[in-house]
Amino acid sequence: MEHDYTFPNVQYEILEELYLPTDEEEALEQLAFNMTGNIENQESLQHIMSIDDKEVSAIFSKRYRPSGTLLVQNSFGGAVPLKRAAIQVKTTCWSNVVHTNDDGYYIVDRRYKDIPTVKLWNRNQTNKTTQRWTEHIGFWVSDNLGKGKTFNYTIAHTDGSKRDLWVKATINNAFVIYDDFANKNGIKRPDNVRTWVFSGSDYGGAPLLHNKAFTSYSYFYPAIASKNNENFGSKSAKTGILALSPLMDLITSVTLTHKNLPDIIIGTKGKNTSEIYAMVFHETAHYSHKNQVSNGFWANVQYQAMFDKTKGTYGDGSPIYSSYTGVAEAWSNFIEYQMMYQSFPNTFSLITPLILDSRYNRNMTAYYFSGSTIPSSTGIAADFARWIPSGLLRDLMDNDNNPIQLKCGSDYETTVYSGVDRVSGFTYKQIYDLLTEDVTSIPRLRDKIIRLYPNRNSNKEITELFKLYGY
């Protein structure tokens, strides 16, 4: 452990404090041992030359800087660089953390004499990803890749014992893609995002609890319930911290003192490369949105996710608090779709958004001629959450002038309104900047756009577009 390492809230004992010499101090020590005939490890002779033969500087030159190139395999074949990942290079006495570049290459800014072990660290410049319980509660964990002076390695896609390593590497690359996208478009970039991975689940979420008080969101739940004529007392046993399960609440309680509560949750059960990318894009878009709204706003989104009893994952849109979810999910579905298209341009159909390993965002189907629905529709409309106007934000930006159908009915068969998108030209940043604390519903988003961009609605283009989505 480093001298300033902070231990988790567990009992521990320091057996001995060690002094680690600098490179120069260790080299001089080895030189002295060589001159006096006291080198016990003969392998050290490979790195030490007689002072009678060479100058001291030549002795130092026998050391080397560990380096290598790391790749990660896609589930559908081929491999890509492991970008900007934190890599730990370590021997018995030395340990350095370096980052790969966009080509997956790393090099340590220190000269080593022994062959180091190379490990993938569970944190980098954008996020900290924890997957095992020991990681969630604060232990310092890294995943072994191998050993070598020049270490070139491909992290294979597998369902075996090394899958955890592949998942972390894939999540790392997804974060890099999102970070570049956010930086380019003036959107809040991920910064020390705490990501919890659950290999036994296929669900994701954005509790956004890192550096938040224990009751940041649950404080608002009774008022939210009352506003919707619900009895929160009957739900209180579920709330805990994440309101998921007693086990989850126990684990989360342990992490509280180490400030490792999750911002986003990624369920990776059975998931392939594109599915993991899509989930990271979606949940990190929530992270960017939350940067512009209050805890009270996000409490409504969380409440809907945990307690909405209407049909489907996102309900049917009828509860009052669903209006917050409509805004939040419209943004995240939109960003997920756009980024998947940009990340897989050669395998993504403009009509049926499928890619090589079958990930698609069905919530975007309203944009592709399947129609949207009004809130409170039943049947397949609620199952697919088509009351959330995911295609709306894309229609603000694109130049497609695509036809749109608004449908309803238990079998999603009745067209109640239809027309053509006549809006275009909005940028990612303009859309993102609209999503502030005051936009608690899609109608409020509409009104804000008309107020800020009256010229875009001179012929009722904005009004008509929102009407086509049921608002």
Image (tube, rainbow, N blue to C red):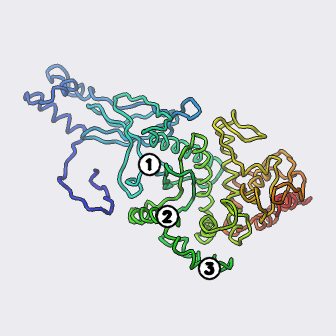
| Mark nearer the N terminus (2 vs 3) | 3
Q: Position of residue 347 (x, y in %)?
A: 69, 34
In the foreground, 230 or 76? 230
Give the residue type that dot 3 points to.
Asn
User: Which quadrant does the C terminus fall into?
Assistant: bottom right
Instruction: List the residue tagged with mark 1.
Output: 123
Residue 465 shown left or right of residue 215 in the figure = right
Q: Closer to the camera: disc 2 or disc 1?
A: 2
> Could you say which disc has been placed on residue 231 in the image?
3
| Label 3 neighbour load within 10 Å: few <14, some 14-19, many 20+ | some
Residue 443 shown left or right of residue 299 in the figure = right
Q: Position of residue 144 (x, y in %)?
A: 37, 39
What secondary structure is found at the residue carrying circle 1?
loop
| Residue 455 seen from this side | no
Q: Closer to the camera: disc 3 or disc 1?
A: 3
Give the residue type that dot 1 points to.
Arg
| Mark nearer the N terminus (2 vs 1) | 1
| Label 2 neighbour load within 10 Å: few <14, some 14-19, many 20+ | few
What secondary structure is found at the residue carrying circle 3?
loop
Instruction: List the residue tagged with mark 2.
Output: 245
| Residue at mark 2 to residue at mark 1: CA–CA distance | 26 Å
What secondary structure is found at the residue carrying circle 2?
loop
